[in-house]
Image: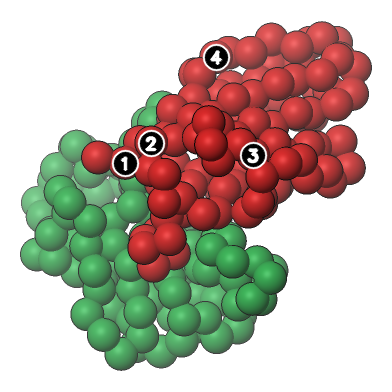
Chain colours: A green, B red
Amino acid sequence: SAVISQKPSRDICQRGTSLTIQCQVDSQVTMMFWYRQQPGQSLTLIATANQGSEATYESGFVIDKFPISRPNLTFSTLTVSNMSPEDSSIYLCSVEASDRSSYNEQFFGPGTRLTVL
Amino acid sequence: QKEVEQNSGPLSVPEGAIASLNCTYSDRGSQSFFWYRQYSGKSPELIMSIYSNGDKEDGRFTAQLNKASQYVSLLIRDSQPSDSATYLCAVASGDSWGKLQFGAGTQVVVTP
């Protein structure tokens, strides 16, 4: 499976500010995904990021709040804008396996733990 | 609204016993089914994938899928304290373009 890294691993931010999270993969991948995991909760998909096209956002998530870039096949960023304490979560990127026999399998980065004060 | 349901637990299992985890899903068009293990403070780790009805075994893990009943399960044989984690069921629909819907997760505690 691909090796995925995220930066930063954790951060503490003030309300009203923005944080950009980076996701780097060691191989080219078509599909990248951004998830949020709120404390004690399961994973919720924020958006799908494909290279060369606009990100596709899930219900309840908007581009103004969570702008995403996907400049190439190994990198993506998620920005959490105008943060409030409710944005305190773990943010995870994932990639879909490129192996055709591993249909829809996703592998996750280590996550970014965000605390908003 | 597509849903994936799991018992939240905790499921307490004696060391060496079999842990049985269940997951139901609402979307009949679902085609791919996954079990992830998540240790506290860590990201989810894929442990099993299953695509067709029946059983799939990998080491101490067995996944079972019944599409007619919209049910997928995970058995952990010879449970070890290192199996103590939250297990997440995830489902992808045929029209989802790879998007996964996750259940709330079942916490498993293996007691020595």
Q: Quadrant of the C terminus of chain B?
A: top right
Chain on which label 3 sits: B
Chain on which label 2 sits: B
Q: Secondary structure at mark 4?
A: loop
- Name the N-terminal-most of marks 2 and 3: 2
Chain on which label 1 sits: B
Which residue lies under the disc numbered 1?
B2
Q: Quadrant of residue B77?
A: top right
Residue that appears at 10% across and 55% down: A82
Q: Position of residue B33 (x, y in %)?
A: 57, 48
Residue that appears at 66% across and 76% down: A99
User: Could you tell whether A59 is left or right of B74 in the image?
Assistant: left
Q: Is residue A111 above or below residue B87?
A: below
The image's mark for residue B9 is 4
Q: Quadrant of residue A65?
A: bottom left
Alpha carbon separation for disc pair 2 and 3: 14 Å
Mark 1: amino acid: Lys
Mark 2: amino acid: Ser
Which residue lies under the disc numbered 3?
B65
User: Could you tell whether B22 is left or right of B91 in the image?
Assistant: right
Q: Secondary structure at mark 1?
A: loop
Mark 3: amino acid: Leu
Whether tag 2 and tag 1 are in contact, CB under 8 A, the answer is yes
- Name the N-terminal-most of marks 1 and 4: 1
- Name the N-terminal-most of marks 3 and 4: 4
Q: Quadrant of the N terminus of chain B?
A: top left
Which residue lies under the disc numbered 2?
B26
